[in-house]
Amino acid sequence: MERTCQKVDSVYMTIPNPKNTLILCDNYGQAGAINYYSKKGIRAVTFNADYINWFDFETKYYHLIRIKNAWEKENEWTETSPYFENACIADSITNKYAREYGTTIFSFMNAKIDINERIKKR
C-alpha cells in the first residue's frame, strides 16, 4: 500500500491548488494507508466506517483524486468524468503481486459542479 501512497502523492503534486483537491478512496484501508504514508500531508477520506465523519466541508474543492478498485474502473470513469472539465487515469498499481493490483488513481480537474454538495447528497 505504501507504493499506492507514493503514486497518490505524485498525482497530488501535479494539480494546481492541491489544497482544494479532495482525495476520495473506495475503502478505509486505502484512506488509512494514504493518511499514514503520505509525505505531502494528504488527508484522504472514504464513505466507509468512521471516515464518513472526516469530510471537510469548509474547504471548497475544485479537483478530485479518486482511488478505485480495479473492477470499478469503467463505472468510475462513466459516472464521474462528466462533472469535470478534465479527467484522466493518472496512474495505477501495476505490480501483479501487489494486493491492490489494478487499483486505479483518477485525476478529475476543474469541477463543473459543487463537489461538496455532491458529496453531502451521497
Image: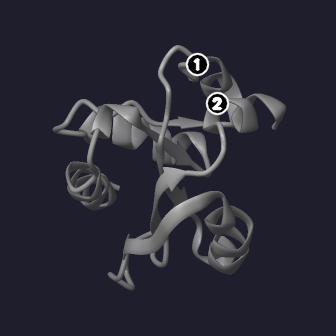
Q: Is residue 4 above or below residue 62?
A: below
Give the residue type at disc 2. Answer: Asn
Name the residue that disc number 2 marks. 116
Residue drawn at (65%, 22%) of the image: 50
Residue 85 left/right relative to 6 = right
**Upstream in the sequence, badge 1 or badge 2?**
1
Residue drawn at (24%, 50%) of the image: 9
Q: Is residue 84 above or below residue 60?
A: below
Q: Position of residue 94 (x, y in %)?
A: 35, 82
Residue 98: tell me if it is visible.
Answer: yes
Closer to the camera, 15 or 51?
15
Residue drawn at (28%, 52%) of the image: 15
Closer to the camera, 105 or 5?
105
Q: Is residue 65 above or below residue 20?
A: below
Q: Which mark is residue 57?
A: 1
Asked where in the image residue 115 lies, by quadrant, the reply is top right
Residue 83 left/right relative to 54 = right
Closer to the camera, 108 or 11?
108
> Which secondary structure lies at badge 2?
helix
**Cβ–Cβ under 8 Å for marks 1 and 2:** yes
Q: Is residue 60 above or below residue 34?
A: above
Quarter of the image with the C terminus is: top right
